[in-house]
Amino acid sequence: MSKQISVVIHTYNNDKIIRKCLDSVKDFNEIVICDMYSTDKTIEIAKEYGCKIVMHENIGWADPARNFAISQASNDWVLVVDSDEQITPELREYLYKFIEDPKDYTALWIPRLNYCWGKPMELLYPDMIFRLFKKGKAYFPPKVHGRPQINEGKEFYMPTNNRKLAIIHQHTQNISSIINKINKYTDLECEKLIQEDKDINFAYAMWRSLWQVLEKFLLKKGYKDGLRGFYCSYMFGVYKFFTYVKYWEYKNKEDGKCEKE
């Protein structure tokens, strides 16, 4: 019997985008939706596609819930997909060929093609992400943007020369969504700095923020994307700067507590 793949998707109020994602993965053996108690039609849509639905506490971001969601998958191989991503037919075929003879590999890093304002971005390619792995051989640290770890075997990095084999990611729809994400994830990044008790001064914060812009626009060739490339590069710098400002705000509070709106 051919080896099978379970797709795991985390959701929370994604009814406006989830159909495109589910259409792209409907031919996999199983789809597990890990929902954080959506209040829109996300679960209703998931049921239309015959998804297995499990629930998890809404903790604000997906990483800590991933291990639970993965544990609910029925097959030996698991593909983690975000609700704003799509899997191309070519990538699906590649993944099934890979698991038929994975040799000593238990995990696969896949290139991702990010779309900003409706167009693919040279700046953000190949954006390698850890998404396919053998169940029980990998885990996700319970912190934002933590690097996945493998327990056994080796990691394989897919070639990046064929963009039809990349995960399609709707990275940026509009500036409002960027601002909302920056505010949300800089809170979480700030909490990481608090746990690590980092010593960060103003000069370091300014340099790291500026470096983000220069690295993305010049070294990562964001200039090839024109004005969109500049906007995107600049937002990386803003993200880094706001993280440090929030950390500075926390360190200078008299009560020593980090408050959120």
Image: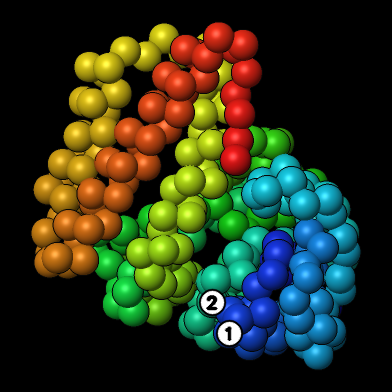
Q: Are marks 2 and 1 in contact (CB under 8 Å)?
A: yes
* Residue 101 shows in the view: no
Q: Residue visible at 51% across and 29% down?
A: 190
Q: Quadrant of residue 146?
A: top right
Q: Amino acid at mark 1?
A: Lys
Q: Residue visible at 41% across and 55% down?
A: 179
- Dot 2 alpha-carbon crowd within 10 angstroms: few under 14, some 14 to 19, many 20 or more: many
Q: Quadrant of residue 170?
A: bottom left
Residue 224 in the image: above or below residue 61: below
Instruction: Give the residue pinned by disc 2.
Output: 86
Percent position of residue 132, x then y: 62, 59
Decide which of 103, 125 is in the foreground and name it. 125
Instruction: Give the residue pinned by disc 1.
Output: 20
- Tally of numbered tags: 2
Percent position of residue 3, x then y: 76, 71
Query: Which of the two labelled residues, at mark 2 and mark 1, occupies the earlier sequence position?
Result: 1
Q: Residue visible at 48% across and 60% down?
A: 110
**Which SS class for mark 1?**
helix
